[in-house]
Image (cartoon, rainbow, N blue to C red):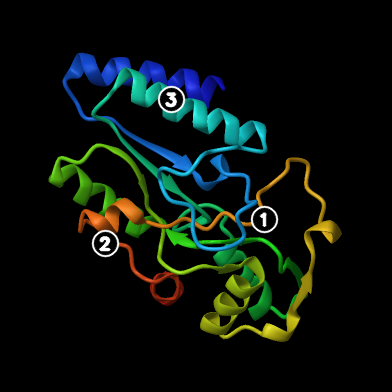
Amino acid sequence: YAVNAVAVRNLCEAANNAGARFVHYSTDFVFDGERMEGGYREFDPVNPLSIYGKSKYAGEVEATRHCPNSIILRVAWLYGPGGWNFSDWVAEQTTQGNEIRIVTDQFGCPTWVGDVSAQTQSLLEAGASGIYHSVNTGSCSRYDWALEAARIAGGDVNKIKPITSEEFPQKAPRPKYSVLDNFYLKTQRLERMRPWQEALQAHLTDS
């Protein structure tokens, strides 16, 4: 909470003092994943399962309260240049011939950070404010994401073994279905997010 909520309040105060716009990045983990069809829209009720999700939602509340004209972008399954990310890890492992086990029952929206950056700039230029879902369009399971990453990278897709979440226990609960719908971006004609497959292709072939 110190980083995801209290720090947001402090940054809002700094932005207000400087007369600057405030942009806050939140997460798909504010939802519980019980929907299992369609995509979560910005106005759907939140119900985070984990401390992480709860603290990120608390950050949204702080941003809305202390910077009413802030932009809050909910993003998901991020990858991009620099540091570890799922897409590059799958590409590396499968091109090296290593076997990996990936869950088939977690669904979301793989999203390239470069597209989020461009979307953020577009929203700032439009003078937008409020909560926006900002993910690459379409959705898939983590297993399908891995298959596509391996295919693009020229890796061995047969090295990717499907498993369930029960076979891959994690310390913190995760929503099994956290697909986001960029509803406000679309209805306000501000969307710049492309299909997740196109973004993944660009990332893996250009990096």
Q: Are marks 1 and 3 in contact (CB under 8 Å)?
A: no
Could you tell me if residue 103 is visible in this image?
yes
Q: Which residue position holds label 3?
A: 61
Q: Amino acid at mark 2?
A: Arg
> Circle 2: is it few (<14), some (14-19), or many (20+) Cα within 10 Å?
some
Residue at position x 14%, y 46% from top?
126
Q: Are marks 2 and 3 in contact (CB under 8 Å)?
A: no
Residue at position x 40%, y 70% from top?
199
Q: Quadrant of the C terminus?
A: bottom left
Residue at position x 84%, y 57% from top?
166
Residue 83 in the image: state x and y as whole percent. 53, 52
Q: Which residue position holds label 1?
A: 176
Q: Up-down: is 8 above or below 155?
A: above
Element type where label 2 sits in the image: loop
Residue at position x 28%, y 59% from top?
186
Q: In which quarter of the view is residue 101 placed?
A: bottom right
Q: Which residue position holds label 2?
A: 192
Q: Amino acid at mark 3?
A: Val
